[in-house]
Image: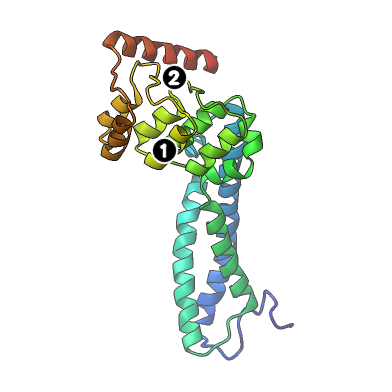
Amino acid sequence: MEPGSVAELHDNDGNPEMKPVLNALTFTGIPLVLATLALAARMVWEETFLTIRNGPQMLGFALAHGPGAILLLAPLLLCLWLVAALITAAIWVLRKRAISRWYRLTLASVILTLSFLSLPAAFWQWLFIGTFAESPHATELMVAEAAMGDVRTVRRYLDHGVPLAARNDEGSTAAFAAAAGGSLPTLEMLYSKGSDLNATNAYGDSPLEAASENGHAEVVSFLRSHGAIQIRGTEEQHQAAAQAIVSRQMERER
């Protein structure tokens, strides 16, 4: 049998009691990697094609309510596998035994797979920003990134032609979303490009009102120091906006 083959996973000088553990870890790691890669592929599909087509997604929501929900367990199991594999490898090295090529490859593939799965959704928007900026949902996506404080991605949307004053389905501009989300760096960048700090949303609320209501003291201070006005929409405005938004969502679903 050739050294390094699948059948001969570990060196002949190792502890006989340890070899079954190493062999078991190698063979169980491979299906876990494949399952996690399948989940990663699904997530990337949602974060790219589906987001471009339908707008911001609740990632994994559809998967969690279908037969593929079992895949959501794969990353957790793979993390547990990694801990066990690293401990086992450390013991093997301390005993000055050589670790097989197959074990090392499996360990490396696990680390790469988990790293790939951990890439944030904004990574794909940043990487394919031209395509995302041409999406009919580009405004929703930019406003969502502003709310999360992703300055770089918001700036790239603007650089690719998404209007500074564009509004999402709730009538919120990127500046409003940044204020509501408490992202001062994003708000400062938008203001430097000329964003209106008093642009109210469909509910009639201003960025200062949103920041104040959410308790973002630094953002409130910035807005007030730059002449922003605290405006709260009336109850009638709130009700009318909520009804209009629900109606549009139902219409789209039809």
Q: Which mark is residue 145?
A: none
The x, y position of residue 216, in whole percent, is: 28, 37
Residue toward you, 40 or 68: 40
Residue type, mark 2 in image: Gly
Q: Residue at x 43, y 23 (%)?
A: 172
- For the N terminus, the quadrant is bottom right
Q: Residue at x 56, y 43 (%)?
A: 43
**Against 138, is 19 above or below?**
below
- For the C terminus, the quadrant is top right
Q: Looking at this rendering, what residue extends furthest in the right direction?
A: 2
Q: Which structural element holds mark 1?
A: helix
The x, y position of residue 108, in whole percent, is: 58, 68
Residue toward you, 191 or 158: 191
Q: Residue at x 58, y 91 (%)?
A: 13
Task: Classify mark 1: residues with Cα within 10 Å, few (<14), some (14-19) or many (20+).
Answer: some
Q: Depth-wise, is mark 2 or mark 1 nearer the camera?
A: 1
**Against 225, is 39 above or below?**
below
Residue toward you, 125 or 56: 125
Quadrant in which residue 132 is drawn: top right
- Upstream in sequence: badge 2 or badge 1: 2
The x, y position of residue 142, in whole percent, is: 51, 32
The x, y position of residue 153, in whole percent, is: 53, 41
Residue linked to disc 1: 188
Using the rendered image of the protein, determine whether residue 154 is visible from the camera's viewpoint: yes
Residue type, mark 1 in image: Glu
Q: Which mark is residue 171?
A: 2
